[in-house]
Amino acid sequence: MLSVQDLAVDIEGSRVLREVSFEVGEGELVCLVGRNGAGKTTTFRSIMGFRRPVGGSITFGDKGLIGLRPYQIARMGIGFSPEESEVFGELNVAENIAMSTWVQTGERSPEDRIADAYKIFPNLEEYRARNGHALSGGERKMVSIARAVATGSKLLLLDEPTEGLSPVIVPSIIAGLANIRSFGRAVFIAESNVHHVPEFADRLYVIERGEIIFVGSPENARNDPVVARVIEGTGLSGAVVG
């Protein structure tokens, strides 16, 4: 489904991603783990067309993404929930979720796609009429992810879905990810906290200083002394690139 090969990205003349390669297959849940500044957000923004790579390839199915505009990439079937989890404060939850169907057509009806969004986080049903500015951080994150689901996309990119959330909320987000996967959608997640990586993840990539240093299961990552030091936050610090 998504294949990234030898991706290289420069920011202000500095190389921040170096030969980054990974794949996300149909129906898979794959995680990109790294500390703040390791290159996770830059990777996501490059996939979505917000940054233009200087080398490598990004393909979705049999189509190359480099050079396309973000809206063109979204229309190909890639949904994106950024780390900031911005929602429209003057719109209520129902409007925030439905708005993705206003601009994104799909094979399925808007009503069906909106219904899927509420199946991901059933408790959002209670907040349909609540305005965005009245939501907690965890509720905003749920709305942001649900809005991406309502696009009907085949692949969802979720940047730091648990970052900054109360430990009480994290299990609800993880349960939502399991629901997304049960629908057959592919999910690619960036996480800085390896303890928030779902146990049902198909594969884990560890990024450090803009390079992939490990590919495997979360358990194997924790059992690798060098990788463990990185994902537990005790390794050497990398450049701040996001």
Image (tube, rainbow, N blue to C red):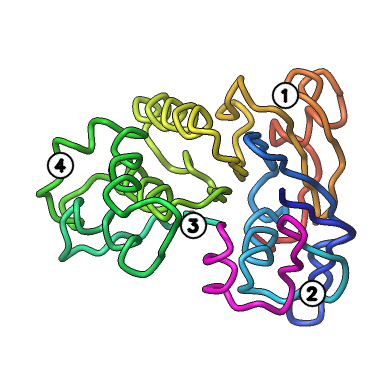
Q: Residue at 15% across / 45% down in the picture?
A: 128
Using the image, determine if residue 205 lies above or below residue 104.
above
Other residues around mark 2 within 10 Å, as few (<14) / some (14–19) / many (≥20): some
Other residues around mark 4 within 10 Å, as few (<14) / some (14–19) / many (≥20): some
- The answer to if 64 sits in the magenta stretch is yes
- What is the span of residues highlighted in magenta in the rendered image? 59-77
Tell me the number on the disc at residue 90.
Answer: none
- The answer to if 102 sits in the magenta stretch is no
Residue identified by numbered label 2: 10
Find residue 72 and report its image quarter: bottom right
Residue identified by numbered label 1: 218
Residue identified by numbered label 3: 82
Find residue 193 and report its image quarter: top right
How far from the left and from the top, in percent, is residue 185? 55, 39
Other residues around mark 3 within 10 Å, as few (<14) / some (14–19) / many (≥20): many
Mark 1–mark 4 CB contact (< 8 Å): no
Q: Secondary structure at mark 3?
A: loop
